[in-house]
């Protein structure tokens, strides 16, 4: 179809319908979407719906990879209530965060395993750092592991290996991490579940006139500037700038990406049904895009 005379909203409507056909889907969930904001404790209701949605995607015949944050936040909460640990401070040594992540990652997986089992799915854990992708051999191994897991019908659950990574080796945020996984595994769709609605022309928390953008056909340098640093939550690390970086990696690798508010996890179903939710960034494959080069220069 010749789309050059269509309005942006018509193009969006048509494009959204094509999302139904995406086969390999990466879903990223941030810490703030998994925890009760008032207490910092796990929101089992939301996690249950997330797992149900992903299990349903699997049952539709899709391949699913979950990138989940939460290790540090869940571990912090566990340690606060059960040991002589006081709190993570700005100037806490990295070992404190690593210890939190070590406790939290295990707990998080325990919860995911339990819920996925309820929906008759098998989940596996993949922990990685920036080095896993920039080193040729470990990148090859990572790719093989993902491929084997997907072939076996397993849902890989991915996080940064926070308990051993230090800043030099870290991707640092799971927006970028999920896009790296999507690119490496040639996924067709990346869904970033967030605490924001999607992309605005300016920070909507500060500028009430900021306009919402539902459809990005081609990401360009002017749009990359729309990213604001703040995430609006005390748990995750991803603000809009990391989401835009993720959009760059995903779309240049030929993967569509949607940023959407995860206050209701059922939104995953709506997106994959082609409904108009959040902001969609259309795949815009660039044969010159080199994942490792991009990571080394930008992440
Ligand atoms: N990997 C971190 C964690 O699980 C989260 C990073 C992020 O918030 O994006 O605690």
Image (cartoon, rainbow, N blue to C red):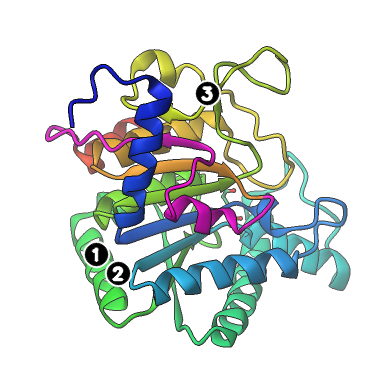
Q: Residues within 10 Å of mark 3 (few under 14, many from 20)?
A: some
Mark 1 burial class by Cα count in 10 Å: few <14, some 14-19, many 20+: some
Q: Main secondary structure of the magenta part?
A: loop
- Tell me the SS state at disc 3: loop
Q: Residues within 10 Å of mark 2 (few under 14, many from 20)?
A: many
- Label annotation for residue 127: none
Q: Is 257 above or below relative to 101?
A: above
Q: Is residue 246 above or below residue 217?
A: below
- 31 shown above or below 290: below
Q: Check whether the beta carbons of the residues at disc 2 and disc 1 lie within 8 A of each other.
A: yes
- The quarter of the rendered structure image containing the N terminus is top left
Viewer-side residue, 13 vs 32: 13
Image quadrant in which the C terminus is located: top left
Frontmost of labels 1 and 3 is 3
Measured from the top left, where is residue 227 in percent x and y? Answer: 52, 23
Which residue in the protein does label 3 denote? 227
The answer to whether 96 is drawn above or below residue 231 in the figure is below
Rendered image quadrant of residue 124:
bottom left
Q: Is residue 299 visible?
A: no
Q: Magenta segment range?
A: 263-289
Tag 2 residue: 146
Q: Residue 143's mark?
A: 1
Q: Kindly report the distance in space between the C-alpha atoms of the residues bearing marks 1 and 3.
A: 30 Å
The residue sitting at 64% across, 37% down in the picture is 196
């Amino acid at each position: 179809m010749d789309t050059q005379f269509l309005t942006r909203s018509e193009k969006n409507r048509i494009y959204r319908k094509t999302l139904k056909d995406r086969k390999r889907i990466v879903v990223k969930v941030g810490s703030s979407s998994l925890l009760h904001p008032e207490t910092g404790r796990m929101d089992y209701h939301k996690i249950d719906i997330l797992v149900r949605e992903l299990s349903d995607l699997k049952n539709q015949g899709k391949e699913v990879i979950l990138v989940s944050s939460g290790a540090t936040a869940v571990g912090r909460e566990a340690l606060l209530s059960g040991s002589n640990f006081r709190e993570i401070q700005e100037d806490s040594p990295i070992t404190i965060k690593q210890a939190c992540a070590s406790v939290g990652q295990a707990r998080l997986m325990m919860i995911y395993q339990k819920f996925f089992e309820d929906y008759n799915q098998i989940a596996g854990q993949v922990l990685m750092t920036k080095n896993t992708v920039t080193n040729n051999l470990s990148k090859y191994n990572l790719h093989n592991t993902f491929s084997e897991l997907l072939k076996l019908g397993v849902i890989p659950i991915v996080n940064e290996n926070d308990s051993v990574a230090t800043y030099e080796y870290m991707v640092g945020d799971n927006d970028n991490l999920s896009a790296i996984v999507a690119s490496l595994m040639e996924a067709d769709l990346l869904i970033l579940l967030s605490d924001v609605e999607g992309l605005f022309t300016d920070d909507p928390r500060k500028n009430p006139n900021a306009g919402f953008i539902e459809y990005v056909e081609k990401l360009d340098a002017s749009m990359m500037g729309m990213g604001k640093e703040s995430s609006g939550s005390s748990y995750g690390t991803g603000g809009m700038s990391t989401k835009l970086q993720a959009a760059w990696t995903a779309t240049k690798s030929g993967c569509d990406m949607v940023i959407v508010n995860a206050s209701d996890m059922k939104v995953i179903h709506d997106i994959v049904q082609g409904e108009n939710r959040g902001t969609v960034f259309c795949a815009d494959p660039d044969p010159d895009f080199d994942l490792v080069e991009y990571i080394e220069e930008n992440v």
